[in-house]
Amino acid sequence: MVAPTGRATGPSEAEAAPEIAAPGASAPAADGTPLHLRHWAPAGAPWATVLIVHGIGEHSGRYERTGRLLAQAGLDVHAFDIRGHGLSGGRRVYVRTWDDFLDDLAGRLAAVREPGRPLVLFGHSMGALIALTYACSDRPAPDLLVLSAPPLEARVPAWQRAVAPILSRVAPTFVLPNPIAGDQLSHDPAVGAAYFADPLVQPRSTTRLGAELFKAMKRGRGQLARLHVPTLVMHGGADDLVPTVTSEPLAAIPGVERRVLPGLRHETLNEPEGPQVVAQIVAWLRTNVPAALPRLAP
């Protein structure tokens, strides 16, 4: 997740979902926007349900290994491409307002929720900010929250922060590239190569999405006292896209456990150590799911 900056590209690049066939179903959001779905089912009866929310410019298909590993651990795992991303509908890398993301998420959580089974919301980068601001809102809460590299602050020049709301109003669909290099994602060079070769990845943002992202960071920082869901924060110690310091405020919130993973970069799940990161998440869930069960009892 990085804030947009740099040379603008034409607005036509932001308009439509690419015509690429891929497995999976779709479901309409409340406003009719089709959201592309993915599902990794466990072999036996699941002990919890997980919904994954991906980051800016990417899509849920990049979580194939993570989804499979979580399912192998007995979890029923769902994911979706957020609006304007991947195979979902909507103008590319654009959102009218941040609450559209939260309303879409509310619909997907309601769709995968099973009576008596704990529901885990799992977000990475911008997806972690979506998950956090959702959990701090008045919408139906998940039972457990996992945040990977949550960005509560953007390290961008002051002029860019000041001009973002102006551009959002006068040219909301203007497209700017995200300054990102493949080796910032993972120590595995194949991860960066696959990211830039993926036709569903959009390494750019509209000015509206950038402005809404900045506002959501401020909103997230201001609402932390409203976070009452047991939460695990995972952050790579060598993350220079979302520096580790930006998630520090979460460590002071009751019920939040924050772990900094030394040497790992932005996409800890896609590092060579990714399976061990998933194993840590599963172990934390196993420890915390029993506390959620009394709340689920009829």
Image: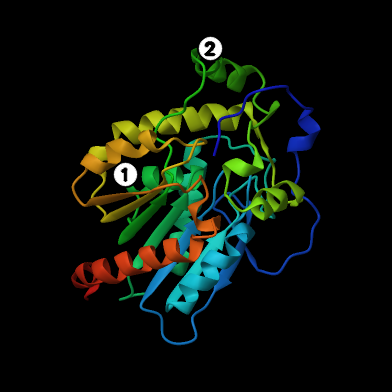
Question: Please, is residue 99 above or below residue 27 in the view?
Answer: above
Disc nearer the start of the sequence (2/1): 1
Mark 1 is surrounded, within 10 Å at the Cα level, by few (under 14), some (14 to 19) or many (20 or more) other residues, namely some
Q: Amino acid at mark 1?
A: Cys
Colouring rule applied to residues: rainbow
User: Whole-Å distance between the Cαs marked 2 and 1?
Assistant: 29 Å
Q: Which residue is mark 2?
A: 159
User: Who's the residue at 66% across and 69% down the image?
Assistant: 24
Q: Amino acid at mark 2?
A: Trp
User: Who's the residue at 57% across and 35% down the image?
Assistant: 96
Residue 17 falls left or right of residue 129: right
Measured as percent of width and height from the top left, residue 51 is found at 46, 62
User: Who's the residue at 41% across and 85% down the image?
Assistant: 45
Q: Which residue is mark 1?
A: 136
Q: Tell which tag, 2 or 1, sits nearer the viewer.
A: 2
Mark 2 is surrounded, within 10 Å at the Cα level, by few (under 14), some (14 to 19) or many (20 or more) other residues, namely few
Measured as percent of width and height from the top left, residue 188 is found at 61, 53
Q: Nearer the viewer, residue 83 or 154?
A: 154
The quarter in which the N terminus is drawn is top right
The quarter in which the C terminus is drawn is bottom left
Residue 145 falls left or right of residue 196: left
Measured as percent of width and height from the top left, residue 199 is found at 77, 50
Q: Nearer the viewer, residue 89 or 233?
A: 233
Question: Please, is residue 92 above or below residue 270 in the view?
Answer: above
